[in-house]
Amino acid sequence: MSPTVTKEPAVPVLRFPAFSEEWEAATISAIADKITDGTHDTPKPTDEGIPYLTAIHVKDGFIDFENCYYLPEEEHRKIYARCNPEYGDLLMVNIGAGTATSAMVDVNYEFSLKNVALIKPDRDLVDPRFFTQFQRFHSARLRHQLSSGGAQPFLSLRQIGKLKIEIAPLPEQRKIADFLTAVDGRIWQLIHMNVLLRDYKKGVMQQLFTQAIRFKDEHGNDFADWEEKRYDSVYSFKNTNSYSRDLLCYEGGEVRNIHYGDIHTKFKSNFVLQNELVPFIKPEVDLIRISKECYCREGDLVIADASEDYNDIGKCIEIRDLGGERTLAGLHTFIARPKKDAIAQGFGGYLMQAREVRLKIMTIAQGAKVLGISKRQLCKVLLPIPSPDEQTKIAEFLTAIDHKIDSVATQITEIQTFKKGLLQQMFV
């Protein structure tokens, strides 16, 4: 069997030495031995049994077995009789928002599928790893070839068979696949390292704020015992504005504005202005009535007072560096300013992340669909406060971990960008 060839074969910009043949365009049906799919019924999952994957478990390039469902042996056999994924086969989501998302099967045990198509490639024509890389790079283009006729995207097996890809000669496919698999391996190593660092930080914070771990002073002596203090004994509150998104812009201005939505979704807890995308207040907005005291200062906490997510209520950032720019806090926020010598620079943000403090804030949240906290309620919350010198030690230690997490995240982004650039030149 040979692929279906178009009239205008093409070659990529970047190639490995010794390869010069033209690439050929083919439909998936021409390079597959079989195209089928799993069940479209909804069998009842069990707590144990045979792994059972749905569309949500097929990610961009990998299969999420850790969070999969399970089926009894009898149910599994009914599905597996017509759809039997094996090592090296390709899975492609064929219904829902993730339609055309694909991954290669990299396990040697049985599992069942729902709303996921199975493509068994002809190994004499295509390396499954090559196809997976191609599809991930061209997923938007492949989706453009779809025709959805219902309330959500749907990709029939016939449509899958008609999807077009360009393939290199098999030896070149293998060379490309080996190289890109190695790049992916490095990316996954860094992602795993990032997860481990975040878990480590979480565990260390738990031990620090329950005082299971204590620092000592420069002479090796214990610091003073921690004290429980009311929130309003260590912080005072400053007024914030209520400007909507309509009064903000990113084109330029004289005053920045921290929006509560960005605290929930974008900003790092250690807030450095130059590292964040913070909108300006539009120049036509009159700010003359806003007092100097209400502008953010380094060391301030900017706290979101509303959230639809119970776990995010009271989420905050600590202002670490404003770079001299005038900055205000906006809609649905408080500014909590540390009182003189009460809170060391950098400590307050970590204190607000501590599990014990988070639980206390959750208990004062009020509301149904949208939860909120008030300054009056927050004032009464009791905080575990060590001496200023021990606060500094804790802040420096946790900041160093955050810097390492950020460094690894930057490496991940850089390698992903590097790979994207390669793909643009290595694939047709």
Image (cartoon, helix red, strand yellow):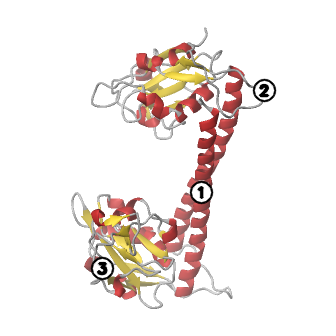
Q: Earlier in the sequence, mark 1 or mark 3?
A: 3
Residue receiving disc 1: 410
Q: Residues within 10 Å of mark 1 (few under 14, many from 20)?
A: few
Residue 143 x/y as whole percent: 43, 30
Most distant residue in the top direction: 1
Q: Secondary structure at mark 2?
A: loop
Give the tally of numbered discs: 3
For the residues labelled 3 and 2, say whether their Cβ atoms are less than 8 Å apart: no
Q: State how far apart marks 3 and 2 are (Cα).
A: 67 Å
Q: State how far apart marks 2 and 1 are (Cα).
A: 35 Å
Most distant residue in the right direction: 18
Give left or right: position of 245 versus 125.
left
Residue receiving disc 2: 18
Q: Earlier in the sequence, mark 3 or mark 2?
A: 2
Give left or right: position of 362 versus 67.
left
Q: Nearer the viewer, residue 376 or 117?
A: 117
For the residues labelled 2 and 1, say whether their Cβ atoms are less than 8 Å apart: no
